[in-house]
Amino acid sequence: MTGQEKGILSGRSDFQAIAAWVRPDATVLDLGCGDGLLLRFLKQTRNARGYGVDIADANVLACVKNGVNVIQSDLERGLAGFDAGSFDCVILSQTLQAVLHTEEIVLDMLRVGREAIVSFPNFGRWDLRLQVALGRMPMSPELPYQWYNTPNVHLFTIADFESFCADHGIRVLERVVLHRGRSVRAFANFFGSLAVYRVEKKR
């Protein structure tokens, strides 16, 4: 791994897990792409090509500076501009908890892409449960906001997401659960702070 690639991975332990699931030369749509570093990383490591989608002016500008194709659009309005099966993979990285129309967005991802990859902070980790039990809204490196300034509107757990998939005809193909960049295998919903899923719509 080059120094540049290590720099991109710094602070984003889900990027490497995501990249491992993106096949070489894949077409990718990255929703809520931020500064475009994930797409840049996928281009460098997997020769992936595609687009990022973000609404913020600053993020769109950052994508351009990072050499990433970007479309300025509001995810909450859906993905009607993309045809079914347009991409090999649609990615939503640490953004699902910040969108209002969760069901619509996930199902639209699986319409537009043959597969989807979703990562999110796990609200079920033990130290977050303890903070709630002590009467406070929880904070962590993955959830670093106060209750009054958080962009997160849906806080959920690994168990919640898997139940959502089961209820909506979504098949989980692979799962990685992490804490501080290390894989968590036992009691993942209790000890994991970040979850990454590869999913598809059941045929």
Image (cartoon, rainbow, N blue to C red):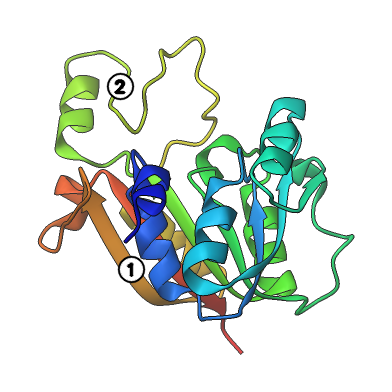
- Residue 166 seen: no
Find residue 146 and report its horizontal and vertical position in percent: 41, 13
Find residue 45 and report its horizontal and vertical position in percent: 46, 68
Q: Is residue 112 above or below residue 203?
A: above
| Residue at (14% x, 63% y) in the render | 185
Q: Is residue 134 above or below residue 168?
A: above
Which is more N-terminal, label 1 or label 2? 2
Q: Amino acid at mark 2?
A: Met
Q: Amino acid at mark 1?
A: Arg
Find residue 86 and report its horizontal and vertical position in percent: 78, 76
Of helix, strand and loop, which one carries label 2?
Answer: loop
Comparing 69 with 85, the one in front is 69
User: Would you say 142 lies left or right of 129 here?
Assistant: right
Determine which residue is flagged by label 2.
139
Q: Is residue 193 above or below residue 131?
A: below
Residue at the farthest top position: 148
| Residue at (34% x, 49% y) in the render | 3
| Residue at (23% x, 30% y) in the render | 128
- Which quarter of the image is occupied by the C terminus? bottom right
Comparing 48 with 12, the one in front is 48
| Residue at (52% x, 52% y) in the render | 38
Comparing 54 with 129, the one in front is 54
- Which quarter of the image is occupied by the N terminus? bottom left
Of helix, strand and loop, which one carries label 1?
Answer: strand
Find residue 130 and report its horizontal and vertical position in percent: 15, 26
Cα distance in 3D space between marks 2 and 1: 24 Å
Residue at the farthest front position: 3
User: Would you say 63 lies left or right of 92 here?
Assistant: right
Determine which residue is flagged by label 1.
175
User: Would you say 73 lies left or right of 29 here?
Assistant: right
Q: On the image, which quarter does residue 91 sit in?
A: bottom right
Q: Is residue 92 above or below residue 17?
A: above
